[in-house]
Structure formats: C-alpha cells, structure tokens
C-alpha cells in the first residue's frame, strides 16, 4: 500500500464509512480525519461525532452546508426542470459535487495527502465524488476502499463491524438498514428486498412521506412565489432556499407527494432499483413548470426542454463541475430572468394539481386567446399559414 500520512474521509457514520474509518487506520497506519456534511438529512450529528471519536479519528469536521446546498446546487438545477430518465429528480447526484469540493478544501487546510469515500465500485457515487475531487485538486490521492479490499458485500462489512466492535445503525425494525442516502432534497433506498424489481417496496422503506392512500382526504392549497426562476415564498411567507424546501417537504410529505419506485440505468451500465422520496422537490418541479408556462417564449421553452434531459444526464453522471454544465447553466439561467410570479396549486393524495398562475411578465394574452370576439387577430390569416405549411404535404402526399 502506498504511504499515506493523513486522509480525509467523507463520513456519514453509517455502516460503510464506519468500517472504512477503521480499515484505513489498520491498513495505512495513517491519521484519518472525518468530514460530515450537513445537507439537511435527519441525523444526530452529536452521535456521528461521538462515533467518529470512539473509532479514533484524528480530526472531526461537521459542516452545515444546508443553505449553500439548496441555494447554489438544488435551485440552479431546478431551473432546468431536471429529470433523469423521465422521473429521477437527482437528489443524490446533486449533493456529491458539493461534498467533494468541501472535502478537498479540508484536505488542503489540514495538509492531508489523500481523500476517501464509502461509495462502492458498482455505483454512480464513486464517479461523482472522484470527478469532483480531481476537478478541484488534479493531483489528489484517492482511496476507494470498496475497489481495494476483499469484502465484497454488505454482509461482509457487517461481519467486520461485529469483529471490530463497530456499532451499526439498525432500521426501524431493528434490522440491518438498506443502503440509504438522504439530504433535504430527497432520500433514497437501495438493496435488500428492493433488489427484486417486481416486489412491491414495503411501507417501512419510506421515511419522509405518508402513503398517498393514507394521506388526508382534503386537498391543501399551496401558493409559491418565484423570482427570476427561483422560489422565494410559500403561502406569502418569504423564506431562505433551505427553509423553503424544508417547508415544502413537510407539506408534500403529509400528502404523500414525490414517492417514486424506479429502475434506472447507472452510468457504469447496470440497471438498479431504488425507492426515492422527494416531496418538496416534486412540488417545486411542478410549480416551476407552471410559472415558466406563462413567462417563457414558446421556442425558448421548447429549446430549454430539449436541453433538460442532457443537463440532467450530465449531473447524474457526476459532471456538475464541467465546462459543458457551465455552458448549459448559462443558457438556462438566461431564460429565467422573467420567470417571476405566483403559482397556486392543490396537493392531494400524492398529486400536485396546478390551479392558477400569474406574473407581472406574463406572455399570456387573453385578447389573443379568447374564444370571444377580438380585433387584434385575423382568423383569415390562418388560411395562408396552413396552406404554406401544407405546401410540401400536398406535393409529397396522396396526389
Ligand atoms: N441511484 C441513485 C443515484 O445514483 C441513488 C444512489 C445513492 N443511494 C443509495 N441508497 N445508496 O443517484
């Protein structure tokens, strides 16, 4: 093994990173500093700190990144209406670049020569972390234990944890947990019973939303204000980006909004099944589309919609820090200058139903759209418009 003096480990306190902390010390005889990012996941950070201390970490960094995460990562991404493969709002993918960036900052601050993470050699997160590390420090040493050690399953990790007296968190039922990732935008669960994509996910997998079936029988009205593409108030109350998303999580969670059961294609190539909950993000997604519907020009909106899957894919693939993301972001941001106004909706049993939208920049023109009499549009003009569009059809179609 290469000689390493000090490594900064991205540490959640879960099974994988707890085992890694111990394994790094054993195998490299180096100092291990831990870095835990508070991205709004429901976590007892005191317990995380205690655990890291017990396991002999040399320095502990726990950083509150909640506002930065939502303001500089989640909101810019949501301006694009991002969906990977049509459904996934990228809750995990958008968090990794920020963690990677901060981890490198800490490594520089304490003169560590390496960084490490708990993502497996099969998934997307190893790619997202490591592209982020290399972008910020091209010569960084990366230790990716899952690709090095001979423990090839979560069961092997549990064995290791037992042998070394490492406490591991249990799920609600006192069993070994799923592979979980959570932040203010979403939580995801993979593995265990979810590995059979035909088996319905048991209710205990869900952590931040009620089942739509058990949700209240009355719809709840929600009003969101937008300014230049970003949400800024809920029900008239101005809030910070993080507070706003948290508020929408509470509303959405109560009404069973934003649950998805997905089989997706990982960057590496295999298909994987996950259960995601994105209550606030789902409300935001629909509201943003609604405010764009009256503030964006038709072709600007269509061009943006064409670019959105590409933008979502590059975030999924870990390319947040890349020239092509900067390029697309500049294009998307340019469209958002007039995306200001108010959206009204009702949330009800898993649904987000838009009920109204208004904007000082609205391009909706009732004089043009009306079914009643108007004097600014000549219906006769449509005849020439259709005839010219039909020109080639009449030439190539049935003669
Ligand atoms: N499949 C999702 C993604 O690649 C989530 C990955 C992390 N989630 C987890 N449960 N380990 O973005």
Image (spheres, rainbow, N blue to C red):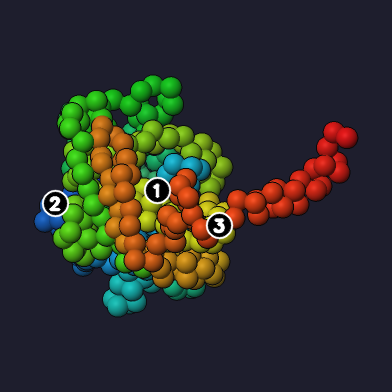
Residue 145 at least partly seen: no
Q: CA distance from mark 3 to mark 2?
A: 63 Å
At 65% from the left and 54% from the top, the residue drawn is 381
Residue 341 at least partly seen: yes
Is 359 on the left or on the right of 59, as rendered?
right
Q: Are marks 2 and 1 in contact (CB under 8 Å)?
A: no
Q: Between tags 1 and 3, which lies in front?
A: 3
Dot 2: element: loop
Give the residue furthest to the top.
Answer: 199
Q: Are marks 1 and 3 in contact (CB under 8 Å)?
A: no
Badge 1: how crowded within 10 Å, few (<14), some, or many (20+)?
many
Is 386 on the left or on the right of 94, as rendered?
right
Nearer to me, 300 or 333 = 300
Q: Residue at label 2?
A: 44
Q: Residue at label 3?
A: 377
Dot 1: element: loop
In the rendered image, the quadrant that contains the N terminus is: bottom left
- The location of residue 231, given as percent across then percent down, is 29, 60
- Ligand 1 lies under 8 Å from the Cβ of mark 1: no
Q: Which of the two labelled residues, at mark 3 and mark 2, occupies the earlier sequence position? A: 2
Nearer to me, 126 or 390 = 390
In the rendered image, the quadrant that contains the C terminus is: top right
At 18% from the left and 64% from the top, the residue drawn is 238
- The location of residue 267, given as percent across then percent down, is 53, 48
Badge 3: how crowded within 10 Å, few (<14), some, or many (20+)?
few
At 59% from the left and 55% from the top, the residue drawn is 378
- The quadrant where residue 225 appears: bottom left
Picture disc at residue 89: 1
At 18% from the left and 49% from the top, the residue drawn is 42
Q: How many numbered tags mark residues here?
A: 3
């Amino acid at each position: 093994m290469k000689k390493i003096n000090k490594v900064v480990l991205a540490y959640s306190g879960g099974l994988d990173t707890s085992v890694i902390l111990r394994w790094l010390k054993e195998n490299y005889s180096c100092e291990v500093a831990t870095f835990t990012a508070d991205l709004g996941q429901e976590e007892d950070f005191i317990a995380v700190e205690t655990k890291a201390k017990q396991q002999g970490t040399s320095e502990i960094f726990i950083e509150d990144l909640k506002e930065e995460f939502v303001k500089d990562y989640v909101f810019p991404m949501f301006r694009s209406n991002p969906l990977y493969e049509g459904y996934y709002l990228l809750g995990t993918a958008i968090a990794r670049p920020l963690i990677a960036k901060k981890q490198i900052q800490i490594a520089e601050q304490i003169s560590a020569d390496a960084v490490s993470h708990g993502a497996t050699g099969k998934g997307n997160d190893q790619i997202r972390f490591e592209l982020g590390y290399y972008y910020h420090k091209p010569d960084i040493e990366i230790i990716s234990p899952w690709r090095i050690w001979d423990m090839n399953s979560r069961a092997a990790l549990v064995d290791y944890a037992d042998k070394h007296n490492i406490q591991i968190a249990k799920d609600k039922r006192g069993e070994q947990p799923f592979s979980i990732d959570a932040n203010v935008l979403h939580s995801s669960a993979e593995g265990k019973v979810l590995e059979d994509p035909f088996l319905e996910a048991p209710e205990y997998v869900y952590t931040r939303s009620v089942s739509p079936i058990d949700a209240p029988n009355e719809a709840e009205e929600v009003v969101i204000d937008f300014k230049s593409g970003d949400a800024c108030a809920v029900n008239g109350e101005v809030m910070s980006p993080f507070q706003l998303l948290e508020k929408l999580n509470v509303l959405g969670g109560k009404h069973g909004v934003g649950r998805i059961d997905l089989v997706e294609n990982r960057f590496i190539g295999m298909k994987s099944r996950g259960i995601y909950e994105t209550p606030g993000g789902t409300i935001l997604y629909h509201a943003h589309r609604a405010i764009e519907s009256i503030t964006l020009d038709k072709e600007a909106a269509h061009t943006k919609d064409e670019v959105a899957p590409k933008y979502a894919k590059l975030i999924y693939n870990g390319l947040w820090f890349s020239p092509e993301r900067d390029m697309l972001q500049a294009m998307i941001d340019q469209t958002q200058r007039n995306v200001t106004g108010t959206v009204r909706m009702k949330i009800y049993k898993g649904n987000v139903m838009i009920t109204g939208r208004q904007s000082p920049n609205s391009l909706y023109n009732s004089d043009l759209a009306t079914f009643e009499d108007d004097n600014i549009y000549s219906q006769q003009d449509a005849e020439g418009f259709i005839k010219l569009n039909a020109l080639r059809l009449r030439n190539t179609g049935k003669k």
